Image (tube, helix red, strand yellow):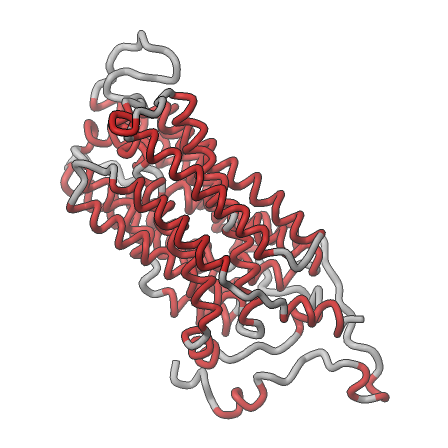
Amino acid sequence: MGAVGSSAEDEDEREPLLVPSHADPAAGPPAPSRVYGRRWLVLSLFSLLAFMQGMVWNFWGPIQSSAARAFGFTGSDIALLVLWGPLGFAPWLLFMWLMDKKGLRASLLLSSFFMLLGSALRSIPLTDLPLRRWLIHGGHFLNGLAGPTIMSAGPFLSTTWFAPDQRATATAVASLFCYLGSAASFLVGPQVVPAPNGTRAVVATVMPASDASIRDRIQLVMYAELSAIAVLFAAVLLYFPSRPPQPPSVAAASQRLGYRSSICRLLSNVRFLMVALAYAVPSGVMAGWGGVLDMVLTPAKVSQVDAGWIGFWSTVGGCVFGVAMARFADSIRGMLKLILVLMLAGASLSSTWFTLTCLSSFTHLPSTAAILYTSCILVGIFINSSVPIFFELLIETVYPVPEGISCGLATFLGNLVSGLLLTFLTFYSTDVSWLNWCLTSSCLFSLFLILFFRESYDRLYLDVFVAV
């Protein structure tokens, strides 16, 4: 990394690639911008990989009761399997450097290779259960190593391939498909893998499943996920260009700060740290909380299948609402702070409602299935849908820092919060009601930071005024 910040690079890093026409009368207009139809293929491949990474990460949480019977997993084991996702962010600086210097193709190829290797490792059908559990943990750690690129590169992809009036929407799709994958695991796991008590969907007369049949169903899902990842890896290997022949906007063509200069600027920028913490704390707590949602809802006598449906709809609702709000942000620019204030206020109210409902024996509030469903789903909708809006605000705040580096640091902080939460959970998994209070507190903390944040739109100014 020492060669990254060379003096020659530092001298030229602020020089724009597209020079305004008024700089030299003989130079003519700026280089033309163009969008390509292939951008949708690039976005689709990236989003599908993100979908599978999220699905593999959240594989065990929705079926923790079945995993306990089939493999002898304890609550601490489930928490550790979820923890491998945040721990995979340890080498995030390496992935951000690779993305900044070699482009998105190189970083995504390496990440998808880790996903393929991890899925193959955990799918080896060994009869030695202790060794099998080690392979499963190793596979999930490799899947977690794909997280820095999968969860941080969406804004970089949208700036590189999409026009300014489509950027927020593309960021939302690329960023939220990982969450959609974790939602799919809430649906696929409980529906395919039978629960130990024989609960399957709404049918209560099914005979209790044996340990062998549970393991066979789990193995079937893992084989299916391995096949899907192998196909996507082959597709990225065959075709995934790092950038289009011509940039889609002035901001996409402009030169950015160097790698080392970007890190120093981010760590010394108070406004960036405010937005990064406002994003990282609730999203990190939500990731840890959602990864063990079955454990959270068990004291409320919610079955594994019902907990899966709650997790599914809360995440899907967040993804749909997030894309809708991103499309709104593309249509009416310069309102990112207002959108976030409304989302975080809704998240604070709904998380407080859910927490007090779970303590109905003390608060005497009505606790029904409908109330638990509604409050929990609203929490997921408000927090998950805020992710692409946070990313866009981060980029506008610190431009011309590269998108991958700024969002990568914020995502690392989010996974650090989630990792600390899950680490504590591995040692104290008997009573998880404290997780609900952590979720409520994180939403209020984020709302407080955004209310006092002063927004700016440097990248938008460049696209609107320089491009004219």
Can you say which quadrant of the picture contains the N terminus? Answer: bottom left
**Relative vertical location of residue 249 with respect to residue 348 in this rendering, above or below:** below
Q: Quadrant of the C terminus?
A: bottom right
Q: Would you say residue 326 is visible in this rendering?
A: yes
Q: What residue do we see at 62% from left, 64% from top?
A: 160
Rendered position, 459 above or below 318: below
- Horizontally, is 304 left or right of 328 in the view? left
Visible residue check, residue 115 = no
**324 and 282: which is toward the camera:** 282
Q: Residue furthest front?
A: 363
Q: Is residue 332 above or below residue 454?
A: above
Q: Name the quadrant containing residue 17.
A: bottom right
Residue 251, how many percent across, how many down? 66, 70
239 vs 1, nearest the viewer = 1
In percent of the image, x 45 and y 33: which residue is there? 377
Residue beneath the point at 39% across and 54% down: 445
Please provide percent x and percent y for residue 223: 37, 36
Tell whether 83 sits left or right of 368.
Answer: left
| Quadrant position of residue 273 | bottom left
Front residue of 435/364: it is 364
Residue 102 point in image, percent of width and height? 51, 71
Callout count: 0
**Image location of residue 389, percent across then percent down:** 55, 54
In front: 328, or 354?
354
**Residue at x-position 53% and y-position 48%:** 47
Q: State which quadrant residue 73 falls in.
A: top left
